[in-house]
Image: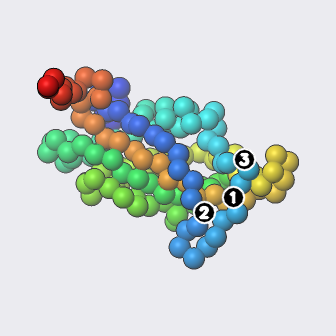
Amino acid sequence: MLFNKLSLSILLSLSVSLCVAQEEFPIPKIPAEYPGGYQALYDFIYDNLQYPLEAKEKGIEGKVYVQFIIDQTGDLIDESVKAVKSDNELLNQAAVDIVRKSPNWTPARLTKKGDTVKQRIIIPVSFYITPPGKRKRKRKKAD
């Protein structure tokens, strides 16, 4: 069951790291890119992420940081996809699953026309039962 646009908000950002385990990656001049850019990635996740039913029933919200590697051809390396930090274990599998469904990316390049290289990417996927714009904010009391 999809919980998009009614009760789900996903916030994404991109973080690039230099190494994974013992494998080092060169720093690309041009980072790997999702087809259509990061707004398109945001839309893909927003439209397809399945909020875990148990988490929703328990009112669990939170953020899962998902790490993955885009190889030299733009393919997402399936075995590289994992939750590296999470607010709640019930959210992990849904975040990992949606990243695994990602289509091919444009690979990272060392130079504008140079060799393609692998790149590790970490994105935070946030789960909210109540969209951020509709949540009540705590107001600071004026002194």
Q: In which quarter of the image is residue 18?
A: bottom right
Residue picked out by circle 2: 18
The answer to whether 114 appears left or right of 139 in the picture is right
Instruction: Please name the residue shown 40% across and 59% down the image.
Output: 83
Relative to the observer, which residue lies in front, 25 or 137? 137
Nearest to N terminus: mark 1 or mark 2: 2
- Where residue 30 is drawn, which disc sits there? 3
How packed mark 2 is, by other alpha carbons closer than 10 Å (few <14, some 14-19, many 20 or more), is few
How packed mark 3 is, by other alpha carbons closer than 10 Å (few <14, some 14-19, many 20 or more), is some
- Spatial distance from mark 1 to mark 2, Cα to Cα? 7 Å
Residue at the far bottom: name it: 22
Give the percent coordinates (x, y) of residue 137. 21, 27
Can you say whether 92 is above or below 62 in the image? below
Give the percent coordinates (x, y) of residue 54. 19, 48
The C terminus sits in image quarter: top left
Relative to the observer, which residue lies in front, 36 or 78? 36
Instruction: Please name the residue shown 54% across and 31% down the image.
Output: 39
- Where residue 134 is drawn, which disc sits there? none
Give the percent coordinates (x, y) of residue 133. 30, 23
Mark 1: secondary structure: loop
Can you say whether 41 is above or below 89 in the image? above
Residue picked out by circle 1: 27
